[in-house]
């Protein structure tokens, strides 16, 4: 059983290359996991479709869009944003599971790039998220949602959604590393819903009590939703006296994502390095 | 690595978790090749020691070198030369056994084709080829431990850490793991193994160290440790009512261990101090009818109990 032992990287370039390969390997792992759990994948993909029906037709029948327009056109950007922030719980669950099952320990006993694990995790999540987004777009088109302002702006909107998803999954990585326990992580899943509901995703914030409205207006989700509505040309664009982030929703989304990344990337990577130390 | 350097060497390792001092100055020297057993009761600090040596935990104090490299300063170099099978199986349950091995191979930076070949090779060699394509979550406890152990062999590392590799396994699965370990040793691998089963250490280990409350309290070959506490005389009486008399007779030699259920009294004797015929005569004179009298070397269990001096706790562990 003679196998030439691989050698540790020496140069900075070598290290960078290996960090990338490790990241790709972990993305591969995420995809194989999904292939092995078709149930989870179907669930992740059917969920958005159910939401479209539930909100679009059940609640939508009673909600009036400010400034007029089709509620389902108003709704779709909200649902896009909602699925983006579910990446928080999927990443947290995956990371917590690895940590509780000792898989993290095995990774850490290997000469792999320390930061590859969290990067691989969020990278895999982005691919799954993109797939979910495609399905969601299909559902939207089926119920009458349209892109009105041309493809470039629409792509910019999807870009923003992916950026937000990416930033939020980093928060999920940190939480997963902190709870380190599958069951606890499972119990935290429902917390995602209030965060996405407490925004302009489903109803205009104008009707909320003042204190709640402040929270909703400053919720990063609201900025992303407003940005998407503007870029897709969907109804419900904020008008008149609105909170600062909603006046410049694209900039606000970029800023929020940047802030989340600046906080959670270093914390997660550090936490991963020093796990159980 | 010079050939004279021990495979594992540690000096004054310490690690504290909050108020608990898990490791309080552990020294180890494990020569290249063979099995080194780390024995100790629950909470003795075995896992913490293994985690320090396998670069998962930073020691608060002390130094350690594994396969010629410092575990803190040259952690990556150490990581290329060790395999670790932790106390709790550490596989991705949502992947098949084969994909797990491929994943780990890739993370050791083997080229994809080599990683795949290596996975097939290992599954074949260690009798898991049939189950290789099933998800690990469908594996039995024994198969899990085995795939976990195999996962640590991907790069054929010269030093292996196995933390309680057979805990919770049935005798057959244990035997299979032992065979695997013996095969590895025949290949020249150095294995550091922690265990609570002393017969396991007795069978596999060339040298053992007994750890208690974070310190090494004895080390040597199993034979040396047994010799240190001397031989024992075991008496099994025929009838339960003779038990007290037998205990009284043997108390004159030393402090007896009694086991009324199996009607066995056992007493340690230092070499040359008493002869078996003398004991038999004494028993006869006291009118004790015996079923069996033997002079034997102590088991490693007895050595362990004597050394750790925490008989009650160990009894709890056995009954648990
Ligand atoms: N991460 C940790 N945080 C807090 N305490 C810890 C941690 N790891 C270990 N300990 C404590 O350190 C002591 C030694 O633990 P360790 O796991 O090394 O013992 P062990 O010999 O492996 O025991 P066992 O036979 O039960 O596996 C115990 O008291 C344990 O509770
Ligand atoms: Mg342990």
Image (cartoon, coloured by chain):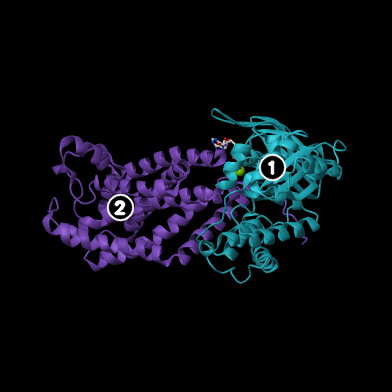
Chain colours: A purple, B cyan
Q: Which mark is residue B51?
A: none
| Label 2 crowd (10 A; few <14 / some 14-19 / many >=20) | many
Q: Position of residue B256 (x, y in %)?
A: 71, 37
**Which residue shows up at 65% across the image and 64% down it?**
B119
| Label 1 crowd (10 A; few <14 / some 14-19 / many >=20) | many
- The answer to whether the residues at label 1 and label 2 have Cβ atoms under 8 Å apart is no
Q: Secondary structure at mark 2?
A: helix
For the question of whether residue A95 can be seen, the reply is: yes
Looking at the image, residue B179 sits to the left or right of residue B260; the answer is right
Which residue is tagged 2? A82
**Which residue shows up at 45% across the image and 40% down it?**
A264
Q: Nearer the viewer, residue B195 or A209?
A: B195
Rendered-image quarter of ligand 2: top right
Q: Which mark is residue B39?
A: 1
Q: Chain of mark 1?
A: B
Quadrant occupied by the C terminus of chain A: top right
Q: Secondary structure at mark 1?
A: strand
Q: Position of residue B43 (x, y in %)?
A: 60, 38
Whole-number angstrom distance, CA of label 1 to CA of label 2: 53 Å
Tell me where residue A46 sits by quadrant: bottom left
Q: Position of residue B295 (x, y in %)?
A: 81, 46
Looking at the image, residue B289 sits to the left or right of residue B18; the answer is right
């Amino acid at each position: 059983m003679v196998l030439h032992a691989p050698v540790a990287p020496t140069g900075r370039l070598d290290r960078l290359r290996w960090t990338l390969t490790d990241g790709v390997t972990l993305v591969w792992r995420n995809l194989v996991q999904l292939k092995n759990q078709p149930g989870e994948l179907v669930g992740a993909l059917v969920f958005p479709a159910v939401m479209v029906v539930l909100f679009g037709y059940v609640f939508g029948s009673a909600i009036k869009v400010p400034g007029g327009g089709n509620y389902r056109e108003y709704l779709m950007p909200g649902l896009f944003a909602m699925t983006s922030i579910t990446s928080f719980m999927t990443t947290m669950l995956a990371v917590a599971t690895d940590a509780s099952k000792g898989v993290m320990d095995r990774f850490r006993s290997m000469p792999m790039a320390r930061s590859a694990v969290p990067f691989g995790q969020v990278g895999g999540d982005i691919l799954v998220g993109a797939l979910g987004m495609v399905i969601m777009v299909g559902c939207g088109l089926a119920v009458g949602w349209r892109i009105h302002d041309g493809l470039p702006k629409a792509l910019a909107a999807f870009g923003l959604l992916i950026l937000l998803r990416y930033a939020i999954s980093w928060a999920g990585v940190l939480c997963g590393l902190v709870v380190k326990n599958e069951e606890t992580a499972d119990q935290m899943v429902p917390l995602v819903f209030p965060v996405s509901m407490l925004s302009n995703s489903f109803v205009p914030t104008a009707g909320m009590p003042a204190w709640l409205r402040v929270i909703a207006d400053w919720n990063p989700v609201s900025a992303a939703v407003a940005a998407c509505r503007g870029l897709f040309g969907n109804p419900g664009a904020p008008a008149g006296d609105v909170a600062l982030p909603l006046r410049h929703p694209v900039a606000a989304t970029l800023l929020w994502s940047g802030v989340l990344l600046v906080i959670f990337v270093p914390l997660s990577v550090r936490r991963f390095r020093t796990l159980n130390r | 690595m010079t050939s004279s350097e021990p495979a594992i060497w540690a000096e004054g390792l310490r690690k504290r978790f909050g108020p608990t001092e898990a490791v309080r100055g552990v020294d180890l020297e494990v020569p290249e090749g063979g099995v080194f057993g780390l024995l100790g009761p629950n909470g003795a600090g075995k896992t913490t020691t293994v985690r320090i040596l396998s670069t998962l935990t930073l020691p608060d104090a002390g130094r350690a070198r594994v396969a010629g490299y410092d575990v803190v300063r040259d952690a990556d170099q150490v990581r290329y030369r060790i395999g670790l099978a932790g106390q709790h199986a550490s596989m991705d349950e949502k992947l098949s056994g084969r994909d797990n091995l491929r994943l780990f191979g890739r993370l050791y930076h083997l080229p994809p084709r080599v990683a795949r070949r290596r996975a097939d090779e290992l599954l074949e060699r260690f009798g898991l080829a049939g189950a290789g394509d099933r998800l690990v979550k469908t594996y039995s406890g024994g198969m899990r431990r085995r795939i976990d152990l195999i996962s640590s062999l991907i790069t054929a590392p010269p030093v292996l850490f196995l933390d309680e590799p057979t805990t919770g396994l049935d005798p057959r699965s244990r035997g299979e793991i032992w065979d695997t370990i013996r095969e590895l040793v025949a290949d020249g691998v150095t294995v550091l193994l922690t265990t609570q089963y002393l017969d396991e250490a007795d069978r596999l280990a060339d040298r053992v160290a007994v750890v208690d409350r974070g310190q090494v309290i004895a080390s040597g070959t199993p034979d040396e440790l047994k010799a240190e506490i001397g031989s024992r005389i075991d008496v099994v009486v025929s009838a339960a009512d003779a038990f007290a008399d037998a205990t009284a007779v043997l108390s004159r030699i030393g402090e007896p261990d009694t086991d009324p259920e199996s009607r066995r009294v056992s007493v340690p004797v230092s070499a040359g101090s008493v002869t078996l015929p003398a004991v038999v005569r004494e028993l006869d004179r006291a009118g004790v009818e015996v079923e069996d009298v033997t002079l034997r070397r102590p088991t490693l269990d007895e050595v362990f109990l004597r050394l750790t001096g925490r008989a009650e706790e160990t009894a709890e562990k056995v009954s648990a």
